[in-house]
Amino acid sequence: MKPAAFTYHRARDVEGAARLLAELGDEAKIIAGGQSLVAMMNFRLARPAHLVDIGGLTGLDGLRTDQDGALHVGALTTHHAMETAPPEVLGTEFAVIRDAMRWIGHLPIRTRGTVGGSLAHADSTAEWCLLALLLDAVLVARGPRGERRIEAADFFLGYYTTALEPDELLTEVVFPRPAPRAALAEFAERRGDFAVVSAAVDLELAPSGGELSGGRVALGGVAPSPVRVPEAEEVLNGGMPGPELFARCAAVAAESVNPPSDANGSARYRRSLIRTLVARACEEAMAR
Amino acid sequence: MTDTTRQALQQQLIGLHVNGEDHEVLTEPRRTLVDVLRHDLRLTGTHVGCEHGICGACTVLLDGSPVRACLMFAAQAEGSEIRTVESLAPGRELSDLQQAFSEHHGLQCGFCTPGFLMLAEGFLAERPEASKEEIREVVASNLCRCTGYQSIVEAIDDCATSRRAALRHRIEGTGEDEEAPCSSATRSR
Amino acid sequence: MTAPPPRTPAEGAWIGASVGRREDPRLLTGRGRFTDDLELPGMLHAQFVRSTVAHATVTSLDLSQVRRVPGVVAAFSAEDLGLADITARLGRPLTEFVPTGMPVLARDRVRYAGEPLAVVIARDAYAAEDGLEAAKVTYETRTPVTSEEQALAPDAPLVHDEAAANTLLDVSMFATEGIDATFDEAPCVVHVETRTGRQNALPLETRGVVASWDHREDQLLLQTSTQVPHQVRTTAARCLGLDERAVRVVVPDMGGGFGQKCVVGREEIAVGAAAMRLERPVKWIEDRKDALSAAFLAREQHYDVRAAFDEEGRILGLDASIVCDMGAYSCYPFTAGIEPLMASAEMPGVYKVPAYRVRARAVTTNKAPTAPYRGVSRPQYVMVMERLFERAARELGLGPTDIRRRNLITEFPYTGVNNVTYDPGSYLESLNLCESSLREEGWYEMKEKAEGEGRHIGIGYSCFSERTGYGSAAFAQRKMEVVPGFDISEARMDTSGALVVTTGTMSHGQSHETTLAQIAADELGLDIAQVRIHQGDTDRITYGWGTFASRSVAIGGSAVRLAAGKLGEKLKVIAASVLETPAEDLELGQGLVRRPRDGRAVTYRELADIAYLKAHLLPKDVEPGLTATASFDALGDGTFSNATHGVVVELHEGTGQVEILRYVCVEDCGVAINPKVVEGQTRGGIAQGIAGALFEQVTYDEQGAPSAVSFMEYKVPTALEIPEVTVHHLETPCAFTETGAKGVGEGGTIGAPAAVLNAVNDALLPTGVELDDTPVTPETVAGALERMR
């Protein structure tokens, strides 16, 4: 389990990294935290001839909220930095993000693994991918042709496949609006593993209170990429929040997707998980 | 039969700062941090258990945070401060954390132990007030095949409790002779 | 580095004290020395070209490109090395057992994906792995045999041409007269069919060896992570065509073994051969991918068992068919008979079973071969027995613990229907204490209340005993060609009065440096700090069988005590001449030989001074030096530890998660030499038992390719899956070990699957679903709970 040989390049700035990627072509890979990539290289399932290390770049980590209330997260921000961010930087309006961090691997993975790395790796059950889709995040990429902003809905193209060009790298992800009533729930047989199914919801309470004026439901582990479930969102819209509505929403979610059967679980089991996890996420979102 | 061991593959010179000492290593870029620590620097206290980031036997501190040394290339660690198990008790005394592991029988074969020690050292430095439940959750980061984990959780919890008590004692100003409850605190046996 | 502070015991009572471990300081400071820590001048690194297919004729193996890879020094095939096969045998007729050779490197035939075909030697492990990629192997694939059913099917392809019906062992035993009538007439007959998942013992330190030729000693030095150093020496010498003295096996610190390292690995031999060829040290460290797919595995068994009961719930008979999927080869020295022979001989367990019939088979399949793994078949047959009793209790309307109480052996010694004699234990007492613990803690009320709220709580037990301290006589019953059993110790005192005691056992986490030192210190009245235990060096240790089958403290500990005692006698003889008094009047203690009558005494140090440096002062007929050697062998059937495990689980709807809410273990291993170590062994064993019950399984696809090749798929449980365990001790001392101790290494693992499975099924009672196969997955549980909606 030793990786194949490669040439190591340390990028000095984003432009330099992009230039290297453009020069080296398909043979090159970006490495940031490397928490997925190095494992794959150790198995020789990935064998890039060149690694471009962006870990030392400055200005790509950290988070800030802009005047419109949007949360900007630098691509090199670690999961651990997110979970330990001071409340004045990451407040209750984005509690869903902070809380989701504890589902990502374990502490020593979160101290190295980065937001950008997770999004670019695009595992179908990765928490960041699910959150990006749920919260309409905008992914900011830089390449030789300059900066490009990609909607999360257009970013995830399939198993480990994204809209990033080979010579682009993620620099930032922007969550455009607060999500004070959002939550993520997932299940894996063993804590810290990639989820069999993950579910995230973002509920909108009508200004008058009482019923929901809308809601979003996103699922991971049911398709090659995380998916929104409009049928289940329909159920939420105008409904009275409570166990009954949430159960109905969860049931509709389970019937509206066509999950795979594989070694991690049958389609039937995944539907059972969706019913449980969507309802659980709704309850937790309402409890915020 | 030709001996090709001297044949050069692409190598690079990297500088590592480990346990307070500077090292220069000429190495292939593909060598992981754990292999460089163990085989180039001969710091064999850090162990290799899975090489894909799950077992945690190779856990070391990188700028104070626990990381998997099998999921990093040594070159990525340039400019960072690395701490390995060899730094916990530089003399002949065990640190309070090591002592707690021994008292609670938190190790049997001892192969996973350095990883758990560094995990706990990094975690307690950041969260000295951690509850036992939080400690158990962090202990779940690494695999142990011998103990069933209970004694590891208890050892770390006991160490955290003692450090907090020592700190309180010091703040209340009644224990001038008390040792600082810092991470490298040792206690005589 | 000094040892941590021991809880100082009363004078002469190290045994029974939770002494701090001698092993700890070095292991806690990173100063241990494991196999991969060894670095020798000029050392090279090995990796193995392994078969990528499960079953095939090898039509060509071309290593020429491998040898051109930068950094690669050499590559050897079976043809290049010409080594003798490793063949394990039983003294049984061919109708019962078929011996099959395991080549060190496969020749024209491969029998599992992962089987070693060639060894690549390079300047480091990276280059060695580069070399593997350059090997060209062509195969003519054969139909793989991937399951026990397929192996036994008519016209099944043969894994070994000489083993008809893919059967390596087939024994039918006991067949109590009239057993068919018993079943025909019994008012209650219950049936359990169960399949248990293939598991990996999974020491966290994988297998590994550093081989080097020592020109001074004219000897091959194998520094290897093995539980059985002398067996490795014997096999290496035979395969390599060397005198046994020309092989020295030294065992560095070991990162676990659990049975996987108590058999001889073909890689150990191949690396030794490569080091001899190249005249350079060669290191091989198994990587995790290989450890998960190509190391020795265990536990895949199929039970089809009936039990007959009378109306009162007394068991009348047991009729069992056991088939164990042993994979591609017989392991050395135990053979593929290890699991079926253990299961068939011991299955009645702690119960008074009047009639018994069993057929036990080992089948060979195209999967990685198996070795003993902590518990060996007992986690499985105990689970079957405990399921049978639970099912009978339900049928007869009895409480699950009541039915057990009616059947537990309560009078000892008890000779069972399986011709095994059980020495005294606390079978009933442990069950009673375990049950009362859970009752007093309110779990039964909690269960009732929670069920009212729609939750699914279950309580389950397992009762079992575990034969430990198998002596030669007990192993001989297995008809092994190589009969383990005894152990030899040498006690040696130096001129400073410090004691070294050798043991043939080999600690891989069990704390022998501490526990065996406690025994020797007590025997001679020494401070434990003055005692060192030496293990794991075939040149320093006369002979030994290593550590497996929970034998170390029972057998090895007895040899230690006898050797120390013999040395004590010699000390007394010399002291008698110094003090001019009969030796019978003297006592040992506090580093002195003393005459209690008047307190006159002479120190060990003074006596050692005479024995070595002033030998002219020795009495006539007393040889210079202070050494004594003694051996111990358990006669008869060995000694039985016992325990009851009680578990409370909650099953979660939707996810199917099995959450363990409470775990209580009442164990009796006789005299606990070091209670803290006993608890550690028990808790660690339970964790592995839970792993087998709920999490771990080695799986293959239809072509026989392993599909659990990383820790992503092979789910070793973490601290969030393994619960806290309360351990209560009972003590029924063993009458014939020298310390009263019984073995304790395996019990935790044996009892856990049955208790967990019973608890799960208790919680599932309202669903009508019963789960008998392990591991019980969340998906299965979720499916079962859905049936109730």
Image (cartoon, rainbow, N blue to C red):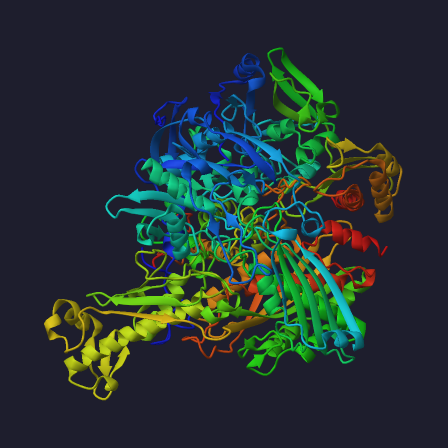
Q: Does residue B45 appear in this view?
A: no
Where is residue C228 shown, x and y percent of the image?
42, 56
Q: Does residue B14 appear in this view?
A: yes
Q: Give the residue furthest to the bottom.
A: C597
Residue in the foreground of this view, choosing between C176 and C715: C176
Where is residue C627 shown, x and y percent of the image?
25, 68
Q: Is C371 positioned to the left or the right of A102 in the image?
A: left
- Give the total of numbered labels: 0
Residue in the foreground of this view, choosing between C585 and A82: C585
State the image quarter where residue C442 is shown: bottom right
Residue in the foreground of this view, choosing between A232 and C433: C433
Quadrant showing the N terminus of chain C: bottom left
State the image quarter where residue A44 is shown: top right
Q: Is residue C324 above or below residue A276?
A: below
Q: Is C659 positioned to the left or the right of C529 in the image?
A: right
Where is residue A288 shown, x and y percent of the image?
74, 44
Q: Is residue C786 above or below residue C16?
A: above
